[in-house]
Image (tube, helix red, strand yellow):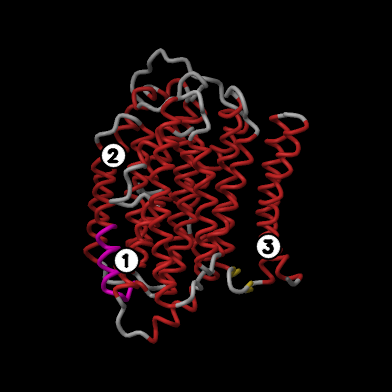
Amino acid sequence: MTEKDFLCLTPFLILSIAPVVIMIVVSILRNYKVVYGFSVLSLLAAFGSIFFVLPSIPHFIEPLLIFDVYSMFFLGIIIISALLVTFLSYDYIKQLEGVREEYYIIIFTSTLGASLLTVANHFVLFFLGIETLSISLYILIAFQRTKSNSIEAGIKYLILASVSSAFLLFGMALIYTAFGTMQFSAIVAALVTDEHLSPLVISGFGMMLVGVGFKLALVPFHMWTPDVYQGAPAPVSAYIATVSKGAVMAILIRFFFILKGFSNHYLFVAVSGIAILSMFVGNILAIRQKNIKRLLGYSSIANMGYLIIILLTGSNRGIQASIFYLISYFFTTIGAFGVIALLSTKEYEVEKIEDFKGLFWKRPWLAIVFTISLLSLAGIPVTAGFIAKFYVILEGMKAGLMVLIILMIINSVIGLYYYLRIITTLFSAPNDTKLPELSLFGNITLAIVAVGILLLGIYPGWLIDIITRFVSL
């Protein structure tokens, strides 16, 4: 390997070395504050190292890795999201009994797996990254070993994720059988010479779509989502909704656009059908929920349905709209789950809608951040969510996807109902529930999230300009 190769791998080396250092420290002396501080500094160092990589891109480490602005942009989003989740985790994990430092080891391994997906240019690295991420999530979901619903959620995710991985691997094997290669660009080159897709190739892509659909919780592969969101610790639910799904979207967009899947009739119909089902099923089932974590789980299904419409635009503008949408969605989701995490104790996790009754009169700051996050998820003006949805609608209309865009608007109106139902609860008469004091780290995180949502909602031009100028495939 060359010096340039090692330079481009710097963020990944930091993410790989950090958990090893934590394991050594924990084996000598357990100190939660030291491990937490080191985790924050390591994530900051990993993010900062991206700027040293930028002058060296585009760069390829054949045949597995591709370093370009697209991959670096997604890598930065994933690391920042992991950092915000780590901030939220401080008080939540600190109050748990038993092992706590190991939580941050698994955060790093899962973030490493997610980061590998952003630079993958080969099925081998694709599968390695997604399995590193998934195996880490098994542990994070079931981290609260004293809670039966956490263990149950971990087992459900383990079983269903294993099945989806089998589909994904079998699909890759079929494509390798058909083309004799696992490199994205080589597969595309082979497809150009074939005028008609063979049943073997169609079956391979179909199986891969099942595997990826599970990771993104798209209908009909969504069954695990509400149970896992409810059973997992609140910061972990935020991590799944942001880092995990963002990483899978990064490689899905790259592969789909390199493959020009939007021009294939079968893939176009399949993605359209999945998008429509995800939007309606996610929003309609969310209406019935009384548990906020389950509600946000179903909401995430609908949001992924909105997002995959971008796959069918077939333009760089569509890719740029998807990146802006993901950034906005990450801020709002971390804000919503962050409020849940800060209000929860080791005895009881605040997750029912009635638990938030009158929150504004007891913790006005939390109620305001929660309201801003929910309004952004609903796509109300002056929030990042409104600009994100408008951006997707605009690019969808340019691509002639009128039916999908109309259905997206209808579903956004449906979603407004259950978001407003929670907001009205926040401002109702308070109950007698005693709430914990807020931590410094929690307040800082919520402040970053709230400012980010409003800044992108009021003045989104600077970020859109950066994305438009530098990000393309």
Q: Which mark is residue 9?
A: 3
Q: How many marks?
A: 3
At 59% from the left edge and 63% from the top edge, which residue is drawn?
Answer: 72
Q: Position of residue 119 (x, y in %)?
A: 56, 64
In this view, the residue in front, 389 or 267, is: 267
Is tag 1's residue or tag 3's residue first in the polypeptide sequence? 3
Q: Alpha-carbon distance for marks 1 and 3?
A: 36 Å
The quadrant where residue 392 appears: bottom left
Q: Secondary structure at mark 3?
A: loop
Query: Is 267 colored magenta in this rendering?
Result: yes
Q: Which residues are magenta?
A: 262-274
Q: Which residue is mark 1?
A: 396
Instruction: Report the side of 84 relative to 432 (left or right).
Output: right
Under mark 3, the amino acid is Leu
Which is nearer the N-term, disc 3 or disc 2? Answer: 3
Q: Which residue is mark 2?
A: 286
Instruction: Say what secondary structure mark 1 lies in.
Output: helix
As for residue 141 lying within the magenta part, the answer is: no
- Measure the C-alpha gap from mark 3 to mark 2: 41 Å
Closer to viewer: mark 3 or mark 2: 3
